[in-house]
Image (cartoon, rainbow, N blue to C red):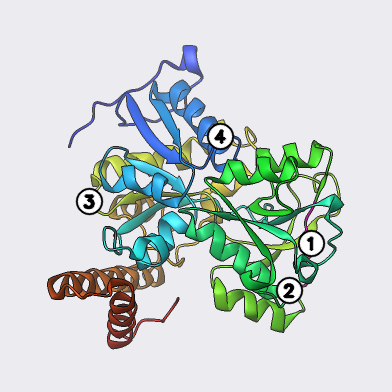
Amino acid sequence: MKFTPIVAAAALFAAPAFALELPKQLTWTAYDTGSAGYNQAVAIGSALQNAAGTSLRVLPGKNDVSRTEPLRQGRVEFSATGVGGSFMAQEGVFEFGAENWGPQKIRVILANNGGAVGLAVGVAADAGVTTYADLKGKRVAWIAGAPALNVNVGAYLAYGGLTWDDVERVDFGGFGDSWKGLTNGQVDAAFASTNSGLAYEAAAGPRGLMWPPIDPNNAEGIARMRDIAPFFAAMTATVGASIDGGPGAPTAGYAYPVLTAMDTQDADLVYNMTKAMVELFPEYDGKAPGIGGWALAKQDFQWVVPYHEGAVRYFTEAGVWTDEAEAHNANLIARQEALAAAWEELKAAAPANWEEAWAAKRNEALTAGGFALVF
């Protein structure tokens, strides 16, 4: 697949002095309108339009499945997603373990590792909660088709010594709906990035918003949290609703958003998308809360999902891709191949109880390959 170079006139667009070989239109899926991921995608789209004349269409998705389905069907080139549409889709777990899904060969392009933005369970300030243990008996949002969000909430509950059985689960059809529910009194707690536009709306609403603390010295609590969601790490959020301008909120976080593509996506397109994301960074930095985490210096090349070959080509040229990163990436790709092979073998066997059979087959394949068992 070839793309015509589009170089905007500097006098008109104040474009950087490099060519971006991108099509005239690109499409990403992202979280709901008002989310941090959506707002950042819009800011990046503006930079692409100004520098290269490329129009970025951002399709909001209510949950991981709705964001990932267009990606695997080839209807969008990229997805600005979270751990659900990346790690859990790769692993073939939760909704992605259904017979019509299976483990996906997802590849990372770039990720927001801001370090200033937490990913946490926010609680209405009038709910009488000061710690996550206090959520016992409270109404907590569950998002249909969004395993990442629900696992993340489960991890915070585990930190507080609770499970979903200890709270009143309230089901919502999408991320945005859950936060509207918190604002209007349908639910007491919901998961989001601390800089989500919907979290800011909740903080400004009649109930207010607070983020119960995660104590980095609570080794047992953090161990319980990571048993549920191994991608979490304790950190201090300095950007977000009810946080901005203060000393920071001790919480936890991980990479979000994560820009992904399928492994089959054209390597030249991915290379140029990576180049645009990195080299246009000064053009979109500061244009949305928490967007600074997309910087090249903040990338984690030994994350839980492998990078696309097109992105690796750019990182290699930039001198930031190491032998250690290559070895780690190769191991993650081998993990994906092992899961894909196990899935195909199970499909051929056509077991009566798919869910139970896939769980056993998946564990067997990971163990045989010497890969870590997660979920």
The residue type indicated by label 4 comes to Thr
> Label 4 vs label 3: CA separation?
28 Å
Q: Secondary structure at mark 4?
A: loop
| Residue type beneath disc 3 | Thr
Residue 373, given in percent of the width and then of the height, sits at 41, 81
- The image's mark for residue 212 is 1
Q: Quick check: marks 2 and 1 in contact, CB under 8 Å?
A: yes
Q: Earlier in the sequence, mark 4 or mark 3?
A: 4
Helix, strand or loop under label 1:
loop
Q: Position of residue 351 (x, y in %)?
A: 20, 75
In the rendered structure, are the residues bearing label 2 and label 4 in contact, judged by CB atoms less than 8 Å apart? no
Element under disc 3: loop
Q: Which is nearer the eye, 170 or 68?
A: 170
Q: Secondary structure at mark 2?
A: loop
Residue 33 disc label: 4
**Quadrant (top left/top right/bottom left/bottom right) for the C terminus:** bottom left
**Which three-letter amino acid code belongs to the residue tagged 2?**
Gly
Q: Going 26% across and 54% down the picture, which residue do you hit?
A: 263
Where residue 58 sits: x, y (%)? 44, 32
Marks 4, 3: nearer the viewer: 4
Q: Residues within 10 Å of mark 3 (few under 14, many from 20)?
A: few
What range of the chain is rendered magenta?
210-216
Q: Earlier in the sequence, mark 2 or mark 1?
A: 2
> Is residue 282 in view?
no
Near mark 2 (Cα within 10 A), the count class, few <14, some 14-19 or many ≥20, is many
Residue at which label 3 appears: 264
